[in-house]
Amino acid sequence: MPRLTDAIDFQAQALVLRSERQRLIASNIANADTPGYVARDIDFARALREATGQTGAAPMAATQARHLSQATGARAEPNLLYATPSQTNLDRNTVDMDRERASFADNAVKYEATLRFINSSIRTMLDAMKSPQQS
Amino acid sequence: MSLFQIFNVSGSASSAQSQRLNTVASNLANADTVAGPDGQAYKARQVVFQTQLMGEVGAAGVRVSTISEDNTPGRRVHDPKHPAADGEGYVTYSNVNPVEEMVNMISASRSYQNNIEVMNTAKTLLLKTLQLGQ
């Protein structure tokens, strides 16, 4: 019965994407002094829609049995975007440290929020499974 | 798990920044050295950072690609009594600019702190992930 873990599955995909984004922002912060580095980020909402199969784009028609289906799951790679620099830099580095730090803190808090959602779903499910004598 | 990669990324960055801090220290230490017998004084050194991809897309670390030397002529001071003075009585000092070096030092130490904080956050998140479902 897959419905039991559907809510957790969704949050798990979100958690993987959050950690991907955390890594991306960490790379941006690490390269704050590298000449020519271009800051990257992902469109989280779109990535999550694609990861959970709720994308608006119609799937490609498979007219042959051996056609590959589109891969789903949490992957950040195809959605990498380039940050638009708010202030240009002499060494062509586009890392905006204020924005990166803000995104980093924001992403960390949302990661923890997702963890709590998963934790509470698990607790709810475990409570529902308990026999009445136990509690 | 991409959170583990953060340690590689930020670790490489803080190592690169500490190397930058190291060159600043040697530049400042040699700010007042005079030319040796060959007439060559100490030349200021600068690190050059380069992005280093760590396996996957999106994990970009930092490495020091080269250490370049500043080739501007050193400071020349007229001091005929100095033992290192040349025939015209000039002493050549190193070309280190202490103000530039101090600015470089502050920038490097701030970047270092930033990366350490990133690692701390990643560690907190990982520890909380380990407690999932308890």
Image (cartoon, coloured by chain):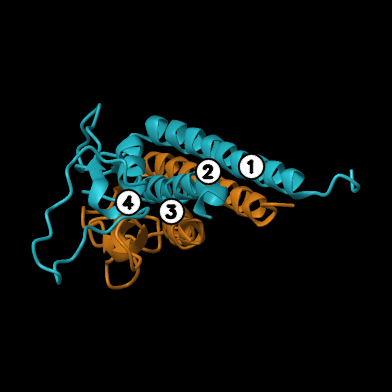
Chain colours: A cyan, B orange
Label 2 SS:
helix
Mark earlier in primary sequence (2, 4): 2
Q: Residue at x 41, y 30 (%)?
A: A98
Q: Nearer the viewer, mark 4 or mark 3?
A: 4
Q: What residue type is disc 3 on?
A: Val
Residue B11, how many percent across, how many down? 49, 60
Check contact, mark 1 vs mark 2: CB within 8 A: yes
Check contact, mark 1 vs mark 4: CB within 8 A: no
Residue B116 can be seen, yes or no: no
Which chain does tag 2 point to? A
Residue B66, how many percent across, how many down? 28, 66
Disc 4/disc 3 C-alpha distance (Å): 38 Å
Determine which residue is flagged by label 3: B24
User: Is A114 situated above or below B18?
Assistant: above
- Mark 3 surroundings within 10 Å by alpha-carbon count, few (fewer than 14), some (14 through 19), many (20 or more): many
Label 3 SS:
helix
Determine which residue is flagged by label 1: A121
Label 4 SS:
loop
Which chain does tag 3 point to? B
Q: What residue type is disc 2 on?
A: Ala
- Mark 2 surroundings within 10 Å by alpha-carbon count, few (fewer than 14), some (14 through 19), many (20 or more): some
Q: Residue at x 60, y 48 (%)?
A: B125
Q: Is the same chain shared between marks 4 and 3? A: no
Q: Residue at x 38, y 51 (%)?
A: A27
Q: What residue type is disc 1 on?
A: Ser
Determine which residue is flagged by label 4: A76
Quarter of the image that includes the C terminus of chain A: top right
Disc 2/disc 4 C-alpha distance (Å): 21 Å
Q: Residue at x 31, y 55 (%)?
A: A72
Q: Is the same chain shared between marks 2 and 4? A: yes
Disc 1/disc 3 C-alpha distance (Å): 53 Å
Determine which residue is flagged by label 2: A7
